[in-house]
Image (spheres, rainbow, N blue to C red):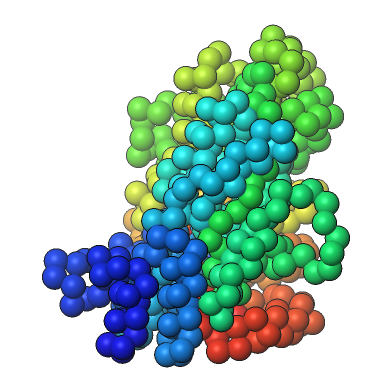
Amino acid sequence: MSALLAQLRAACGDSHVLTHDTPGADLSAWEQDWRKRSRGRALAVVRPGSTAEVAAVVKACAAHGTSIVPQGGNTGLVVGSVPDDSGTQVVLSLTRMNAVRALDKDNLTLTVEAGCVLQHLQDVAEQAGFLFPLSLAAEGSCTIGGNLGTNAGGTQVLRYGNARDLCLGLEVVTAQGEVWHGLTGLRKDNTGYDLRHLMIGSEGTLGIITAATLKLYPLPAATLTAWAAVPSMEAAVQLLGMAHHTLGPGLTGFEVMGQFALSLVDKHYPQLRVPLFKDQPWCVLLENSDCESEAHARQQFEALLETAMAAGCVTDAVVAENIAQARGLWHIRESIPLAQAEEGLNIKHDISIPVSRIPAFVAETDALLEREIPGVRLVDFGHLGDGNLHYNVQAPAGADGKAFLRDWEDQVNTLVFDQVARFEGSISAEHGVGELKAHKLPSYKDPTALAMMRALKQALDPQNILNPRKVLA
Ligand SMILES: Cc1cc2nc3c(=O)[nH]c(=O)nc-3n(C[C@H](O)[C@H](O)[C@H](O)COP(=O)(O)OP(=O)(O)OC[C@H]3O[C@@H](n4cnc5c(N)ncnc54)[C@H](O)[C@@H]3O)c2cc1C
């Protein structure tokens, strides 16, 4: 291994190759996943500063048969970005590759390196008068390489699509250490297989993304946020239909939050002042982005909420008066995962179901879980506009979280995933498969699709050095 380490140091410079023998080095930030579900041990953490250095690192690792775990901000939620505990894998961190390479205002594109932090890209776009719409609670630390690696979703998918839909071109280092120069800004290119779509969402198992050309949009003239209490999940779905109809493409966010999820925010962060959650089982957060004016957006929102109240699918609502209030409402939504973590360990699911079937899915699955685990607490929230629920299962009040996970995680996952399959949904809507769900995939993925995935992996990475055992166990 010392020969490999010497080659890595020659490629990237001594200070950018860390091992457990490096004086004063603490590798835990790269070895521990965000949810603290897994702590691996790396042979080395390598931090190349250019595409050529990434290629040299991959070539050296391939020559030694050493596997590589690509890593961005390490905020992934499915144990995809950390090494196993063998002490033989190289973590390839892209965070030093954080340059904005080009802004093409007429083509509405931004070309950036993989290690750029998402929030920085949003700011760069805004300063140039544009919107880069990918938005998620981890945006202060996740990177665009990781967003594309996981095909991240977030809160604006309803209008702008997920990371895949926001990317026009890629630069990728292959498992052989070759560079694919695919940074086109083209919206049309039918010259054969679309390799970009193969790489996006492959979670570092098919290639290493080093740069991307991203789509920009005009900044809206006004963005308004409303919070509504709704009497049932059926009513929430009905409201979504009305919002599509009234707001058209202005509808840029539609989040649902269960009463128990909001009660956790209220309990752990009382200063956030959660509105309207005490009397109804669900609340909804809506966002209207208008290209005309704030007055127009407000008028549309008021018309929508009046109609919805008359139809009985909203019982009470508030429209944020200013940006600070709107941010406050979004902050409540984004605090649910943190409040849930404060409450204790829980079993997380990131599932998608056709929107029309979500009410039946929730009613049936809640009942099945309550029958199996008396007192179980369900932390339901998510991107209802995309049919994506974070359907999380928390131990009964007072129970030990660790023991709950040990005794119930597998059974609960099977119960929920079987229900997802029955309702023709997906066991991973936006977080990916990683290591956490790789063993479940064969039970829920179409066998022909799985065989094609294995064939692609074999063709592109025959040595199986790129993120082995992630996605495909
Ligand atoms: C608080 C919080 C909220 C979140 N909210 C959402 C949400 O709303 N929607 C959503 O979709 N996700 C969400 N996530 C999870 C989400 O997947 C990540 O935050 C983000 O997309 C991952 O980016 P990262 O740079 O941290 O990638 P990492 O965690 O470092 O890596 C994620 C995966 O991508 C691979 N990868 C990383 N960089 C590259 C690269 N350059 N080339 C190839 N593969 C690469 C890794 O090997 C790994 O498999 C959330 C996470 C947190 C902590």
**Which quadrant does the N terminus fall into?**
bottom left
Q: What is the quadrant of residue 417 in the picture?
A: bottom right
Q: How many marks?
A: 0
State the image coordinates of residue 341 (x, y, percent, origin top left).
38, 52
Instruction: Pick whichever, 21 or 37, lies toward us.
Output: 21
Instruction: Using the image, determine if residue 12 lies above or below residue 144.
Output: below
Instruction: Pick whichever, 90 or 49, lies toward us.
Output: 49
Q: What is the quadrant of residue 16 in the picture?
A: bottom left
Residue under the image location 43 percent in, 68 percent down = 53
State the image coordinates of residue 290 (x, y, percent, origin top left).
71, 21
Instruction: Pick whichever, 260 or 74, lies toward us.
Output: 74
Residue under the image location 40 percent in, 28 percent down = 272
State the image coordinates of residue 235 (x, y, percent, origin top left).
74, 36
State the image coordinates of residue 320 (x, y, percent, origin top left).
56, 18
**Which quadrant does the C terminus fall into?**
bottom right
Instruction: Using the image, determine if residue 99 lies above or below residue 78.
Output: above
Instruction: Pick whichever, 376 or 104, lies toward us.
Output: 104
Residue under the image location 30 percent in, 68 percent down = 13
Report if residue 42 is visible in the image.
no
Q: What is the quadrant of residue 243 in the picture?
A: top right
The extreme left residue here reads 23
Residue under the image location 36 percent in, 31 percent down = 270
Instruction: Using the image, determine if residue 465 lies above or below residue 295.
Output: below
| Left or right of 82, for residue 17 | left
Instruction: Using the image, determine if residue 285 lies above or below residue 326.
Output: below
| Left or right of 46, for residue 226 | right
